[in-house]
Image (cartoon, rainbow, N blue to C red):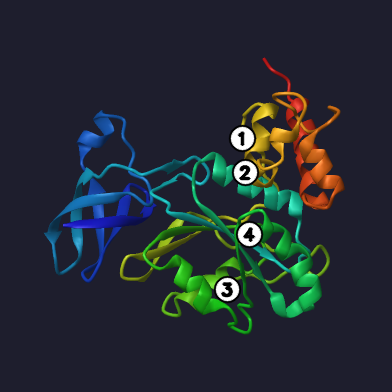
Amino acid sequence: MQGKIIKGISGFYYVHVVESGIYECKAKGVFRSRNIKPLVGDNVEIAVLDEEHKKGNIEAILPRSNELVRPAVANIDLALIIFAAAKPKPNFNLLDRFLILMEYQEVPVAICFNKTDLVSEEQLHSFADIYAACGYRVLLASAAREDGIEEVLALLRGKTTAVAGPSGVGKSTLANCLQPNVRMETGAISRKIERGRHTTRHSEIIPICGNTYIMDTPGFSTLDIPGFEKEDLQRFYPEFAAYEPYCRFQGCSHISEPDCGVKQALADGKISGLRYGNYKLLYEELKSVKKY
């Protein structure tokens, strides 16, 4: 029997089998001897020991399509990065860091701006259109009004999706709209600092329907970008690619070189100043990292 690990606690793994339910399983000792740790998201083969009480053993871990470091999960088909349109005001530098982190781990990514009812159409499109123009799939939703939920669900259907984003943007509320049978804990926003309390304490995959799963990850208020070279950063800004052939120098950093195609596109309004500003900040951050 095959299923997916949706939660792991104290050596027990909870395996969801479509149309059969959730089985509490132990991993066979052979995994420890081979230094293999089952991960949330793993597709596994189990042997049922007690059907009535839904208990079994994990016999095999099927090949992983990917393995994320943070959070430590496997077989993620999509990362849905959720930011609030307001309350808290979106931090676009942090959004770019999330996008870079997921693309660095080779996970397809989409962006959802929640709480759209709190801003005007003009305000919303002033930043949503920037990311859409970069080639990202951008969804607009209001979990409070249950607007845009069908579009989000259509994107998630048939996939295992990691839901990520800072605290307080409504990730758990949105997840509750997608699966009314599973009420995830939600937390209030602190009016004083407009940052949500951390309500998600561990990685857990939630079955939505059939083979559709979401994983609500702990909220982050900051995020370190991965340890790659500053020269690698530009490949995580896909909108640069069309203008790089017009750079005078091969390997142009798009920072201080003359005759730079990317900087000319910026001057012509073809590249977002918001995005380019974040690129410069992250480039300088990577440049200042000491090599030991």
**Residue shown at 25%/67% (left/top)?**
18
- The residue that mark 2 highlights is 100
Return the disc, 4 or 3, that comes first in the chain's sequence: 3
Q: What residue do we see at 55% from left, 44% from top? A: 103
Q: Is residue 287 above or below residue 62?
A: above
Instruction: Quickly name the residue at label 1.
Output: 226
Sequence-earlier tag: 1 or 2: 2
SS class of the residue under badge 3? helix
What SS does tag 2 mark?
helix
Label 2 near label 1: C-beta < 8 Å? yes
Q: Circle 1 — which element?
A: loop
Real-space CA distance between mark 1 and mark 4, rounded to the nearest whole angstrom: 23 Å
Q: Which mark is residue 173?
A: 3
123 to 221, vertically: above or below: below
Return the x and y of residue 63 as percentages of the image width and height: 28, 42
Instruction: Give the number of callouts.
Output: 4
Q: CA distance from mark 2 to mark 3?
A: 25 Å
Mark 4 Cα within 10 Å, few/some/many (few <14, many 20+)?
A: some
> Where the N terminus falls, by quadrant?
bottom left
Say if residue 27 shows up in the picture.
yes
Nearest the viewer among 162 and 229 is 229
Q: Please rate how many residues cluster around mark 1, counting C-alpha atoms within 10 Å: few if below 14, some from 14 to 19, many from 20.
A: few
Residue at horizontal 46 percent and vertical 44 percent from the top = 72
Choose the circle earlier in sequence order: 4 or 2: 2
Query: Residue type at mark 3?
Result: Thr
**Which quadrant holds residue 190?**
bottom right
Q: Position of residue 263 (x, y in %)?
A: 82, 39
Residue 198 bears which disc, if any? 4
